[in-house]
Image (cartoon, rainbow, N blue to C red):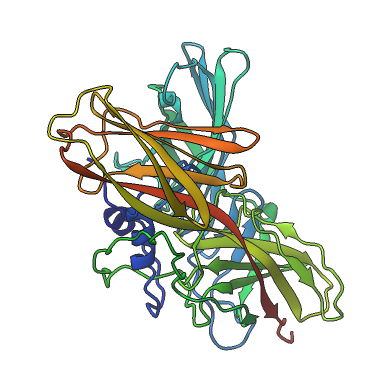
Amino acid sequence: MKQTPRELLEAAARTHVQDDVNLYPRIAAQMDKKRLPRSLHARPALLILSVLLALGLLSGVAYAVGRSLGYIPGVGLVEQNNGIYILSAPASVTQDGRKVTVNQFVTDSQRTFVAYRVNGISPVTSGFPNCTDPPKLQLPDGSTLDFSGGGGGGMESNNGEPMSFETSYTFPPLPAQTSKVVFISPCQMPPIELALVPAPADFVTPAVEIRATFEATGPKFASTPTPTSGFQTGGATPEPYPSSFPATPTRVPNGSGLYLEKVIVMENSYILIGNFTDAGDLPGFLLISGGSGSEYLPKIEDADGNTVPFIVRSDIRPETNWGGVYYWAYEVQKPVKTPLKITLDYVNVLKSDTTRFQVDIGPDPQVGQKWNLNLPIRLGGYDYIIDQVEVLKNGFLVSWHSGADLPEGTSFELSIPGLSPSMTEGLRGMEDRRKDRINYAQNFLTDEPLPIGVVPFELTLDQTVELPGPWTLTWTSPAP
């Protein structure tokens, strides 16, 4: 059964944060209000909130160490107090032309990181090969661990030849001093027994977490966009916010903008870890399309205003995205003269506008019956003409057009209030751009009986809009 946005949120991993801000009504309204862009739907484990960086800030002296942290490239931060165990050597299994290889395995007291590759996957005509399903870990006592984050990976294929797939997952930590674990691989491959050994002393780069104090500024926007004449802003009444669920990974006292969560000090660099949070006061929903941490790159300047080069540390930023929060982690080499000023010039937001029109289809509509409307509407600041409505076997086809001034980066959704879209047939849309006009068509299919009489249609326009800042964050390193 398909889960609701609230059920997905409540099923995700919890984070210990202040609950000053309630983001759920805004997130739920946006998700409930039809759909987010395809790129948001496509991310695996979108709402499984990673605990990779759920490390509490230290109190007291800035450099006081509450635990011994370290950094492993490609893996991220690890905790060394109770020891780190790694894979003694890559391990693999081969069967029926397929090969699964576990390349990296790191476990500490907080989590377990596993990276593996599958070769020789047979192409499929639809869907995803089952070799992309998540694996499990089996402990010596026979119990198993399910993944807590990660996934996605990349599929490689060439002209219909067997494919390969490479990815990484995080799991809960193993019991202390576990020296053997079984990797239960996907695609019905035999299990792989992994031998673990203590990590050598030089395997981890020492790191220390310090207090993440900062100052931030940013523009202010009206919390509710002003509707344009001729259309109404769509929306939904969200369910009550569950008080047990955290509102956001960090407190957001300044509203939407840049926030610093952690600062990691290493021998030759600083790593600044933070986020851009949409606290509900932006004129649109913050769009986050990728997981690399390079979508919104800022400018970093030192105390003299000189540009400071930095490295994006995707292995340290949280693995998955909390709705309305964009995570980042930047490494700056020492020496550097602080305070450092991070400036983000813009973000992309989604603006959704909805208009409603009615068509009287009579008491007995027939398949193929058409109504030529020539009905002018205004949606999202643009003029359209609803050309035609046609009855299909299990729904309707609506055609309309606009002038050629409508920009790229827009999408439409057709709906009928009170009628659910089909769960068995896909909905389709068409856009035909010509010199002087753009023609559109979209169907609405349902598994329920078709309505009769006056039928209300709703047409929603989603626009990706570049929202200018700037937003700034200033951080000063404490005295050693």
Q: Quadrant of residue 273?
A: bottom right
What residue is shown at x 44% (from left), y 16% (from top)?
125
Q: Quadrant of residue 144?
A: top left
Task: For the C terminus, give its image quadrant.
Answer: bottom right
Q: Quadrant of residue 449?
A: top left
Describe residue 274's horizontal placement relative to residue 180 as left or right: right
What residue is shown at x 78% (from left), y 80% (from top)?
338
Task: Locate residue 36, reporting x and y percent.
Answer: 43, 49
Task: Locate residue 412, reporting x and y percent.
Answer: 44, 44
Residue extending furthest left? 363
Residue in the foreground of this view, choosing between 50 and 348: 348
In the depicted structure, whether residue 211 falls above or below residue 348: below
Residue 411 shows in the view = yes
Task: For the N terminus, give its image quadrant.
Answer: top left
What residue is shown at x 55% (from left), y 15% (from top)?
162
Residue in the foreground of this view, choosing between 424 and 205: 424
Residue in the foreground of this view, choosing between 337 and 106: 337
Q: How many marks?
A: 0
Residue 170 shows in the view = no
Describe residue 441's horizontal placement relative to residue 329 as left or right: left
Task: Locate residue 439, reporting x and y percent.
Answer: 51, 34
Residue in the foreground of this view, choosing between 206 and 357: 357
In the depicted structure, whether residue 454 falls above or below residue 177: above
In the depicted structure, whether residue 44 falls above or below residue 431: below
Task: Locate residue 266, reporting x and y percent.
Answer: 71, 67
